[in-house]
Image: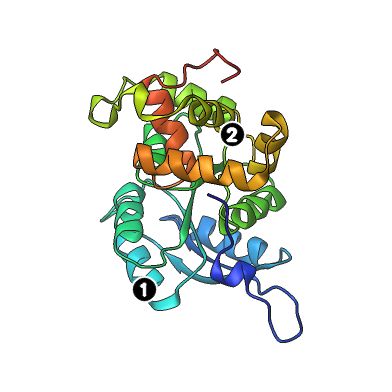
């Protein structure tokens, strides 16, 4: 569901929005340093810390309370998938997690999305695009690239452990999920279905609850893996 993070939506005494705070997790010190410098220079973003492995990520999040963790998945001691799962399960107000990856077809990325990451961004993207992904995640939206996600999930076997009967969703909820799978935001879904934004938010909330999804990105992954949404059909 859409929503604002604490720092992203909090207004200071002057009325200006507080910057989105970010923790950068990557085992390559050059990547960490470069992202820290370049992202920190982007408007509305403040880098508050760095971590070189999954164990340090969890420790730093508990200490620094960032809004967003920019998470590499291939790290020593504990990988980014397990770190994501621990962060989202172990806190009342966990940070949003955005996976940063070299290859979009990495199985680790799909696993991290299933663990509850809000989305992913490629390391080769220009820094302003990475910054925008951070802002989008902090605001509670999915950082979703539908075509890339379809390719990743289509290459994986169906996940019977997550399979749910199609009847668990109403017809309108399935329609909303299909539009979510194309990357549409709540306002865009509202326009497509000619309904109010509040109605869409209700449907999205019901979809997440019924699928047991961490967020809308996870819901789309489950939809593809269980066959509720089939790549190439119904605009998915």
What residue is shown at x 50% (from left), y 24% (from top)?
Answer: 150
Mark 1, residues whose alpha carbon is within 10 Å: few (<14), some, or many (≥20)? some
Which quadrant is home to the C terminus? top right
Q: Mark 1 points at which residue?
A: 62
Mark 2, residues whose alpha carbon is within 10 Å: few (<14), some, or many (≥20)? some
**In this rendering, is residue 165 above or below 82?**
above
> Within the image, what quadrant is residue 163 found in?
top left
Q: In the shown orientation, is residue 210 left or right of residue 236?
A: left
The numbered mark, 2 or 1, whose residue comes first in the sequence reads 1
Return the x and y of residue 212 as percentages of the image width and height.
34, 42
- The residues bearing labels 2 and 1 have C-alpha atoms spaced at a distance of 30 Å
What residue is shown at x 53% (from left), y 28% (from top)?
Answer: 172
Question: For residue 145, which numbered disc appears in the image?
Answer: 2
Question: For residue 78, which numbered disc appears in the image?
Answer: none
User: Residue lying furthest bottom in this view?
Assistant: 13
Q: Can residue 42 be seen in this view?
A: yes
Q: Is mark 1 on a helix, strand or loop?
A: helix
> Within the image, what quadrant is residue 65 found in?
bottom left
User: Residue lying furthest left in this view?
Assistant: 161
């Amino acid at each position: 569901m859409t929503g604002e993070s604490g720092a992203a939506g909090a207004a200071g005494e002057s009325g200006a929005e507080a910057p989105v705070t970010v923790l950068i997790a990557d085992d390559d010190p050059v990547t960490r340093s470069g992202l820290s410098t370049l992202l920190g220079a982007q408007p509305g973003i403040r880098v508050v810390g760095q971590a070189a492995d999954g164990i340090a990520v969890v420790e730093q999040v508990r200490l620094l309370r960032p809004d967003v963790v920019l998470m590499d998945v291939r790290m020593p001691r504990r990988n980014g998938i397990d770190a994501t799962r621990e962060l989202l399960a172990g806190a009342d107000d966990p940070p949003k997690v955005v996976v940063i990856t070299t290859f979009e077809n990495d199985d680790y990325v799909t696993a991290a999305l299933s663990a509850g990451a809000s989305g992913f961004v490629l390391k080769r993207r220009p820094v302003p695009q990475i910054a925008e992904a951070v802002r989008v995640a902090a605001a509670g939206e999915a950082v979703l690239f539908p075509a890339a996600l379809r390719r990743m999930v289509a290459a994986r076997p169906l996940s019977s452990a997550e399979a749910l009967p199609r009847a668990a969703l109403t017809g309108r909820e399935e329609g909303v999920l299909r539009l979510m799978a194309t990357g549409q935001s709540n306002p865009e879904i509202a326009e497509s279905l000619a309904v109010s934004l509040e109605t869409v938010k209700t449907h999205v909330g019901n979809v997440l609850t019924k699928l047991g999804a961490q967020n809308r990105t996870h819901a789309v992954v489950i939809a593809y893996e269980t066959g509720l949404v089939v790549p190439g059909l119904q605009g998915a």
